[in-house]
Image (cartoon, rainbow, N blue to C red):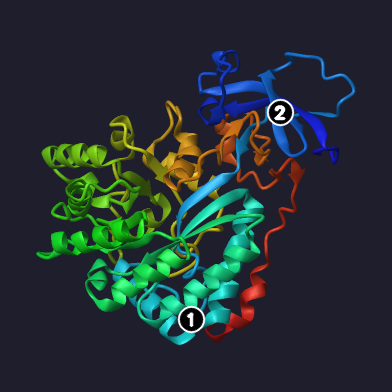
Amino acid sequence: MIPTAEHYWLKNVHVPASVLSLHDSSVTAQQTGEGLCLIDLEIADGNIVQIITADGCDTGETPTVNLRGGQVWPCFVDMHTHLDKGHIWTRSPNPDGTFDSALEAAKLDSEQYWQAEDVYRRMEFGLKCSYAHGTQAIRTHIDSFGQQAEISLEVFKALQKEWCDRLILQAVSLVTIDYYQTPEGAALADKIAEVKGIIGGVAFINPDLDAELDTVFFLAKERGLNLDLHTDENNDPNSICLQKVAEAALRHEFTGQVVCGHCCSLAVQESNVVQKTLDLVKQAGIGIVSLPMCNLYLQDRKPHTTPRWRGVTLLNELKQYGIPVAVASDNCRDPFYGFGDHDVLEVFTQSVRIAQLDMPYGDWPCAVTKTSADLMGLSGVSRIGVGLPANLIVFKGRNFSELLSRPQSDRLVLRKGKAIDTTLPDYAELDDLVRKLA
């Protein structure tokens, strides 16, 4: 139980060394083989005011909680989601689990149901889940063709305002990038600028791709916006959109942050193609976000056939090359992924298993915390350091095996040092929206 006092200590806490923001190296000198440090945290007035090696001082009469080696992480950052699509599975399931069927089911659902109340309530449901699980910042891609942009961006602005004291929200436009060749595409870029969002879209290999990317980069530079693009969400070795994006970033001397999501085809390309792509991505300063759960669900799916590959990009190789890599939720209970609960711990757990991010774990915890925050431009967020807000998640799991073997449903979430209510919203809240096909 976390004290209600403004001033208290968390004692005997295991923290991943990679998420610590420290000037005193003595705290990180003693680490377990998994890269965990055993420390004491002093919290006062909502901030972390002292970090010391465990049992490093007498806390006197200050209230203390002995966590007996349990882990404390900074609150999560979920940097690639689709909140506007979320929780439509009951009324619009994917009939065969394929990518093409997901596109069609989502398109039909949006045409029939995506008015303001529907989008608002489903997005808010996702925010409630995320907040209860311990997320602090979310970037959501928002379907933005035609009038849908007006509806969904207005909903986003309302939720951004209402949740501003609990969650940092960023919006990314989602269209195919050829849309930006039209006057409507330029108008969309202006709408995204108004909400201080990010220009996004889906790139496909085609003869006009370079010209399409030139327009996208021009629109972003003109408005001072960053870019977040879906690239190569397939197993086609000839799909080299990531490489093309990097070339465009270098061609335009783009100084904003570029993020590319999925990048699945990189895992099925020849080594010389991979090497060229990694070189360009590194030069261009592009960050990569992988969505292992959704890609595992969709990629290489054929009727009555066991998939032969996992659909995940070259996470280890990218990271070893010095390219920032994050993992995130992607879709949740919609035709692209029929499961999920906006729980970034589940994302991390499944990513470790799917992409073998253990042995060693190294600094992979940063993929759902510090690295994601940095790619979103949120310096100081999702790390543990003196002077930073005590936005923390407390787990009973003392090592990674314990942490990742159970769902940690009994976790405690602290915001500015105070425990929040982690009760998840009831699915029944959305029954009147989805009951038509229930």
* Amino acid type at mark 2: Val
Query: Callout 2: few (<14), some (14-19), or many (20+) C-alpha neighbours within 10 Å?
Result: some
Whether pointer 2 and pointer 1 mark residues with C-beta atoms closer than 8 Å, the reply is no
Residue 152 in percent (x, y) is at 48, 74
Which residue is nearer to you in this view: 212 or 32?
212
- Quadrant into which the C terminus falls: bottom right
- Can residue 88 be seen in the rendering of this structure? no
Q: Quadrant of residue 147?
A: bottom left
Q: Which residue is mark 2?
A: 49
Where residue 169 appears, as percent x and y from the top left, is 53, 58
Position of residue 206 relative to residue 349, above or below, is below
Q: Which residue is mark 1?
A: 114
260 vs 126: above or below: above
Q: Residue 3: which numbered mark, if any? A: none
On the image, the x and y values in percent for residue 240 come to 17, 52
Quadrant hosting residue 294 = bottom left
Horizontally, is 37 left or right of 188 in the view? Answer: right
Q: Tell me the crowding category of disc 1: few under 14, some 14 to 19, or many 20 or more residues within 10 angstroms, Cα based.
A: some
Q: Residue at x 26, y 73 (%)?
A: 179
Position of 265 with respect to 355 (left or right) is left
Q: Position of residue 101 (x, y in %)?
A: 33, 73
Q: Nearer the viewer, residue 261 or 313?
A: 261
Residue 119 relative to residue 106: left or right: right
User: Relative to residue 344, is residue 37 depicted above or below?
Assistant: above
Quarter placement of the N terminus: top right
Question: Which of these two is toward me, 193 or 111?
Answer: 193
Q: Would you identify the image quadrant in which residue 30 lies?
A: top right
